[in-house]
Every structure is written in structure tokens, then in C-alpha cells.
Amino acid sequence: MNWLYLGFAILFEVAGTSALILSQGFSKALPTVLSLIAFAIAFFFLSLALKTIPVGIAYAIWSGAGIVLISLIGFFLFKQSLDLPALIGIALIIGGVVVIKQFSSISGL
């Protein structure tokens, strides 16, 4: 269940960041409110995941997956470009998350 909580935390963080982009610097009310609600839900689920997953591991996966997902959303929905160094960096982040999840012997994983 702890990984499900972390997954929800990631999804709501990405939704909050996407709404943050649409809020245009908190100048649009609906995206601003959606962003704040999504971030609150994300932190709630992250707090549940932290009951069994070590904070460093959970945060690495949460932030790494969030970076990858929001980069894809930025590319496909907001037409933001990603250059070769950005793509290499994202690939390294994905690799790091896979290494942590597959090979770490830390309890809770």
C-alpha cells in the first residue's frame, strides 16, 4: 500500500504543477485553487508513504518521477521543448529511480 500512496503523491504533485502553470502566476483563480488542493493532497499521500518508505528514498522517487512526468506534460501539452542535455538528464533520473526500486535493500522497499 505504501507504494500506492507514493504513486498518488506523485500524480497529485504533477497535477498541481500543471495547474500552477495554468494559473499564470496565481492570476487565474480556478487553476490556482486546483493547484493548492492538488499539492495538499500530494503531501497527504506522501506523508502516508513515509510511514514505511525512508524519506530519502521516497523523496528521490517522488521528485524524480515528478520531473519526468511534468517534462512530458510540458512537451506534449504546453509545447515546451526539451534539448539533448535535458533528455539525457531525464534518462539518468529514470535510471536512478529504477536502480533505487530494483536494487536497494533498505526496508520498506
Image: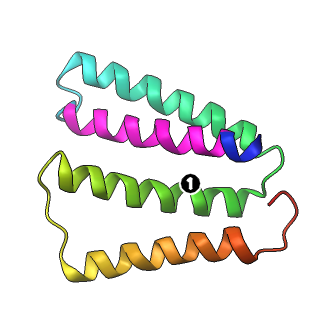
Of 16 and 103, nearer the camera is: 103
Residue 97 vertical position relative to residue 30 in the rendered view, above or below: below
Between residues 7 and 33, which one lies in front from this camera angle?
Answer: 7
**Amino acid beneath label 1:** Trp
Q: Residue at x 45, y 53 (%)?
A: 66
At 35% from the left and 19% from the top, the residue drawn is 33
**Residue 61 vs residue 39: left or right?**
right
| Magenta segment | 5-22
Residue with the mark numbered 1 = 62
Quarter assignment of residue 7: top right
The quadrant in which the C terminus is found is: bottom right
Secondary structure of the residue carrying tag 1 is helix
Q: Position of residue 29 (x, y in %)?
A: 23, 17
Residue beneath the point at 37% across and 29% down: 35
Residue 45: x, y in percent?
65, 35
Q: Is residue 40 left or right of residue 53?
A: left
Question: What residue is drawn where x is 77% and y is 40%?
Answer: 1
Q: Quadrant of residue 87?
A: bottom left
